[in-house]
Amino acid sequence: MTRIAMMGSGAVGGYFGGRMAAAGCDVAFIARGRHLEAIRERGLRIESPALGDAWIQPATATDDPGEVGVVDYVIVCVKLWDTAAAANALLPMLGPATTVLTLQNGVESAELEEIVGPHRMVGAVAFIGCAIEAPGVIRHVGTMQRVVMGEFRGGSSPRVARLRAELGRGGIVADVSNDIRRTIWEKFVFLVGLSAVTTMRRAPLGAVRDNPEARELFLNAMLETAAVGRARGVALADGFAQDRLEFADGLPADMTSSMHTDLERGNRLELDWLSGAVVRLGSESGVATPVNRRLYEMLSSHAPGRQRESNRRRVR
């Protein structure tokens, strides 16, 4: 049986890993804190009004990858600031044929590749709206639950096909991209705009797209991000940003971004790897990014999260 480890079992890792585990796949969940305790005590629950609930009990869950042993696939789903730590921690799960892929946000995976080796890496991207509702409980919004994978050299391979089959067993829509780097950037374009504007406006997607000023900001953030991608050699279509805006019109009105959810909960934000990355990569590529720079500057004071902000105040 194919063995899969979810390195990070929050909203994204918990959902996709949970769907596979519920279908009988051999999945180990690497988690921590109250979330881990809840999974150990009560199992992992998925709540999805549109697609149906699932309850994985018992679930194989630990905070020590060494307890899991060698697996066939490691799917990295930690927050972006934890990438290097997660890459080092997952080393005990790597065997000669282990494949590693990331469903993280962002377009920069150099840290992960450097530690685990580029030969292990498969490109992947996830499309889903979900969040941790409570420790041990993942809430899924809408019907979108899709993973797109591909070899960085292009297309599929036996290892891609094998994981695609495991995802399919869990009822997850799994596709193969012939240009996975472009696919990753296509998601990044949309996610940068969605994350920054929903977070800045403190509102879900429906309120953003129905407000002319917010809608224009959303579009302009995506236009800049697409321009940066093209400058870095990514074959994004000229009208891609406008297409994504029209795509957003068909999504659930209550859908939001993980960054907006993190802001509401006082958590650290992935701002530096989203809007911040657009500004940084744009500067490297000679592309002006005034909208993303403005969004980055407006949100930067919230990026550390409330706990870290209060710690800084106490130190001062």
Image (cartoon, rainbow, N blue to C red):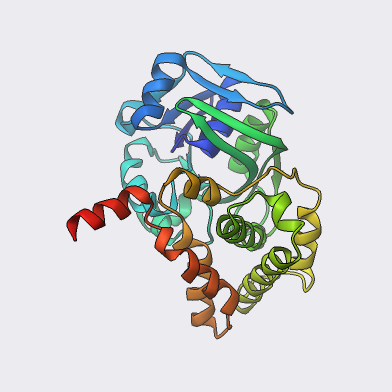
> Front-most of 63 and 157?
63
| Residue 139 horizontal side relative to residue 303, left or right | right
Q: Quadrant of residue 193?
A: bottom right
Rendered location of residue 221, percent (x, y): 64, 69
| Residue 41 horizontal side relative to residue 204, left or right | left
Q: Is residue 86 above or below residue 140?
A: below
Q: Residue at x 55, y 37 (%)?
A: 131
Rendered location of residue 281, percent (x, y): 51, 75
Q: Is residue 308 above or below residue 274?
A: above
> Front-most of 303 and 125?
303
Q: Residue at x 46, y 43 (%)?
A: 265
Rendered location of residue 269, percent (x, y): 45, 54
Rendered location of residue 71, percent (x, y): 44, 32
> Front-most of 15 and 168?
15
Q: Residue at x 59, y 49 (%)?
A: 257
Q: Is residue 54 above or below residue 180?
A: above
Q: Quadrant of the C terminus?
A: bottom left
> Can see residue 232?
no
